[in-house]
């Protein structure tokens, strides 16, 4: 299930105001969580929040990063009895909601499966069917609960992995920090999970690009389309940037919690727009697990999201599908590009 992000290419098309007293464009970039971050905002006080954002991202890693041996989630996976923080509590709350709505397509208890398939620190050997069956018996969101800020596992073998939602939530945390500082216009991007707020000084919306699926992980990045991001967040999950190859076969990093195996359907990528980046991130993963038919059926009855799917058609052709709200954004993006 767990994916690593297909980067949404952010088009920072900035227009500086001619007034000397207007808000100044500020840009903070760096690396965190094994990926990049890029934060752009306008501030009349010309404040540099680099130190504060670095502290936020460091605290986030020490909460939920599986690459940090002393992070809270690593200690929980070792069955240490510790009190969890607000980050983990909120991630579990969002995950519970998405797990229920997706009927288990999204499940953060697949940590052992992800690790065994080689999408964590060590690649190792591919698991056989007996190993997959054994691991499947140790997953299930219903096997964990919270009591007095402690995670209670009904199965001690369960490993929690927030990688399919963590970068989205770190985007949300930074966005909330900027808002708390009175910043009314910003674009926060952590590894391709993006939150946009307000408009730029010239009144234009933040514009983001959705990447065209590539043949190989090392291929360059091309833009499929450009859309305005209006007080929303967007995340993309895909199968073409992170995978394993063995004996001539390509294994997707997206693991289906119901089977224990990498997904094999024709969905190449899905971009989801939601009110917050964590929710968009989680549903993008859920839809990659479900495949386009199940995902679009869910979207017919669940109107809180917009989505854009890129999938393989017959004879190797590439096709797309967009929800009505996403279609409107695509049309608006095209109109804005023509005006340039």
Image (cartoon, rainbow, N blue to C red):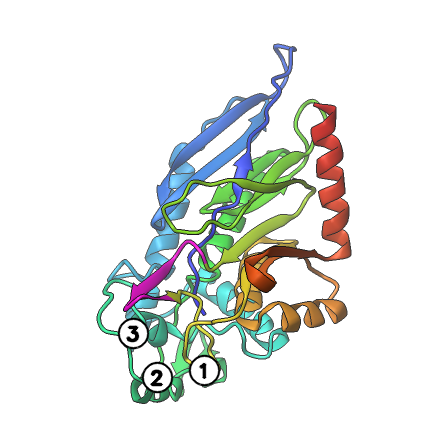
Asked whether, in this view, residue 295 is left or right of residue 289, the answer is right
Task: Answer with the quarter of the image where residue 32 lies.
Answer: top left
Check disc 3: other Cα within 10 Å, few if <14, some if 14-19, many if 20+: some
Check disc 2: other Cα within 10 Å, few if <14, some if 14-19, many if 20+: some
Check disc 1: other Cα within 10 Å, few if <14, some if 14-19, many if 20+: few
CB of mark 3 within 8 Å of CB of mark 1? Answer: no
**What residue is at 42 percent from the left and 72 percent from the top?**
262
Q: Which residues are magenta?
A: 240-250
Spot occupied by residue 119 in the image (x, y as percentages of width and height): 32, 64
Q: CA distance from mark 2 to mark 3?
A: 9 Å
CB of mark 2 within 8 Å of CB of mark 3? Answer: yes
Spot occupied by residue 34 in the image (x, y as percentages of width and height): 34, 49
Q: Is residue 245 above or below residue 216?
A: below
**Residue position for label 2:** 132
Q: Which is more toward the observer, 148 or 78? A: 78
Spot occupied by residue 127 in the image (x, y as percentages of width and height): 29, 79
Say whether residue 310 is visible.
yes
Q: Earlier in the sequence, mark 2 or mark 3?
A: 3
Secondary structure beneath label 2: helix
| Quadrant position of the C terminus in the picture | top right
Q: Is residue 173 magenta?
A: no
CB of mark 2 within 8 Å of CB of mark 1? Answer: yes
**Residue position for label 1:** 259
**What residue is at 59 percent from the left and 50 percent from the top?**
234
Q: CA distance from mark 3 to mark 1?
A: 14 Å
Q: Earlier in the sequence, mark 3 or mark 1?
A: 3
Q: Which is more toward the observer, 56 or 288? A: 288
**Residue position for label 3:** 116
């Amino acid at each position: 299930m767990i994916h690593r992000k297909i980067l949404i290419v952010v088009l920072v098309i900035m227009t500086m105001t001619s007034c000397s007293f207007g808000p100044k464009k500020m840009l903070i970039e760096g690396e965190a969580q094994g990926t990049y971050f890029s934060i752009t905002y306008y501030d009349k006080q010309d404040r540099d929040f680099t130190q504060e954002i670095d502290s936020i991202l460091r605290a986030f890693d020490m909460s939920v990063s599986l690459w940090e041996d002393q992070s809270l989630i690593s200690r929980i996976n070792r069955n240490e009895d510790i009190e969890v923080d607000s980050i983990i509590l909120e991630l579990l709350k969002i995950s519970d909601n998405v797990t229920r709505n997706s009927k288990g397509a999204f499940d953060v208890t697949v940590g052992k499966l992800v690790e065994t398939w080689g999408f964590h620190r060590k690649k190792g050997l591919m698991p056989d069917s007996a190993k997959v069956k054994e691991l499947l018996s140790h997953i299930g969101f219903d096997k964990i609960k919270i009591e007095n800020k402690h995670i209670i596992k009904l199965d001690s073998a369960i490993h929690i992995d927030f990688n399919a939602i963590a970068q989205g939530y770190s985007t949300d945390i930074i966005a909330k920090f900027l808002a708390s500082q009175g910043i009314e216009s910003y674009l926060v991007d952590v590894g391709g999970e993006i939150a946009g707020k307000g408009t730029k000084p010239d009144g234009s919306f933040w514009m983001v690009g959705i990447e065209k699926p590539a043949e190989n992980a090392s291929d360059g990045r091309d833009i499929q389309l450009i859309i305005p991001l209006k007080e929303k967040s967007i995340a993309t999950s895909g199968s073409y940037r992170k995978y394993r190859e063995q004996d001539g076969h390509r294994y997707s990093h997206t693991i289906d919690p119901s089977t224990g195996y990498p997904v094999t359907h024709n969905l190449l990528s899905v971009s989801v727009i939601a009110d917050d980046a964590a929710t968009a991130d989680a549903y993008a993963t859920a839809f990659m697990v479900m495949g386009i038919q199940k995902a679009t059926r869910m979207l017919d009855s669940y109107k809180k999201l917009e989505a854009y799917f890129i999938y393989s058609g017959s004879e190797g052709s590439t096709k797309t599908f967009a929800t009505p709200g996403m279609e409107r954004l695509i049309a608006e993006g095209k109109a804005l590009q023509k005006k340039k």
